[in-house]
Amino acid sequence: MKKLTTILSILSAFLFFSSIIVSGSAEAETINLNYSIFFPATHGQCKAGTTWAKEVEKRTDGKVKITVFPGGTLTKANQCYDGVVKGISDIGMSCFAYTRGRFPVMEAADLPLGYPDGLTATKVVNEYAKQVSPKELSDVKVLYIHAHGPGLLHTKKPVNTLSDLEKIKIRSTGLSAKVVESLGGVPVAMPQGSTYESLQKGVVEGTFGPMEVLKGWKQGEVIKNTTDCYGIGYTTAMFVVMNLKKWNSLPEDVQKVMEQVSDEWVDVHGNTWNEGDKQGKEYTLSLGNKVIPLSDKESANWKAAVKNVISSYIKSSEEKGLNGKEYVEKLTGLIAKHSEK
């Protein structure tokens, strides 16, 4: 009996220490990733990015752990892409437009082509990137791209016609700066995070952006009017990319999960943009702000004014050895395709 007890004690100890070793081994195998997002934590797009991370964790049964750093706390908006390339962050979300000139092929997506809504814009830019496979993105793993609904003009003073916009300082980024210039305004480059204070202090008198910024970034508190210039609706394409070395180090099953979740989250972000636009409009109207529609004649004037932005892009891209005309035609076709759906 004593001998049996001794054997059982040894066996019990063996199983106990084995469980510790297995547990420790499992912990050692956990893949820890960090994720830099320029949107503040309360923003719908940051929440969408965070739920993407949680879904990846869930579907990998905890093999992957992703720590999200919102509000540009890990890398600032204009440093996010390089931060991923250099390995400061494993994953990053920001705008291509914040590093102007760096992404000439993706710049085409931001042209004032008349995007009808955020879901359509998001589907378009994803399909566009896959079709053209730009070399400028070859230093990262592109997980997916999303894009906001039509960029509209939000100002302190009402803008009913192009003449009302003349020489007014307008916050803009990337190609939207050229849109402002073509409409007669004065573009002032700055990220969304600086816009509220700049409007509040009078550094700028207006901003171009989707309706969602009026609530998502609280800009409805510091403007009084929105000019509904949807006919020249541009978008801003936003990347979700991963450090290439880190991506290549992942097991195939984890890569597969991340790609599957990313494909699904295209619609998540697109629908979030649409919901954000809806809430932004409701919010600004609740503050007593006005939405100013353009007449058909005035809308035609705005469209004519921005044509040079598109032709200028085509010319400058061709000077760089790129087929800008093909990019514009491809995007226009994709907008029509996804608008029908």
Image (cartoon, rainbow, N blue to C red):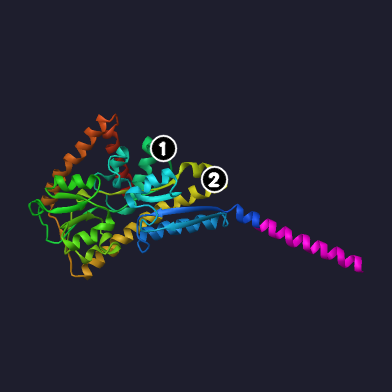
- Taking depth in this image into account, of 232 and 156 the one nearest to the observer is 156
Graded by Cα atoms within 10 Å as few (under 14), some (14 to 19) or many (20 or more), the crowding at tag 1 reads: few
Q: Tell me which residue sits at (34%, 45%) in the image.
A: 125
Assess whether residue 315 is covered by the magenta stretch.
Answer: no
Q: Is residue 5 visible?
A: yes
Determine whether, in the image, residue 341 is placed left or right of residue 174.
right
Query: Disc 1 marks which amino acid?
Result: Ser
Residue under circle 2? 250
What range is drawn magenta here? Answer: 1-23
Residue under circle 1? 138
Element marked by disc 1: loop
User: Hey, which quadrant is residue 316 in on the image?
Assistant: top left
Alpha carbon separation for disc pair 1 and 2: 18 Å
- Height in image: 289 above or below 56? below
The spot of residue 32 in percent (x, y) is 52, 53
Q: Is residue 341 visible?
A: no
- Taking depth in this image into account, of 41 and 340 the one nearest to the observer is 41
Graded by Cα atoms within 10 Å as few (under 14), some (14 to 19) or many (20 or more), the crowding at tag 2 reads: few
Assess whether residue 12 is covered by the magenta stretch.
Answer: yes
Q: Earlier in the sequence, mark 1 or mark 2?
A: 1
Determine whether, in the image, residue 140 is placed left or right of residue 313.
right
Query: Disc 2 marks which amino acid?
Result: Leu
The spot of residue 251 in percent (x, y) is 57, 45
- Taking depth in this image into account, of 41 and 7 the one nearest to the observer is 7
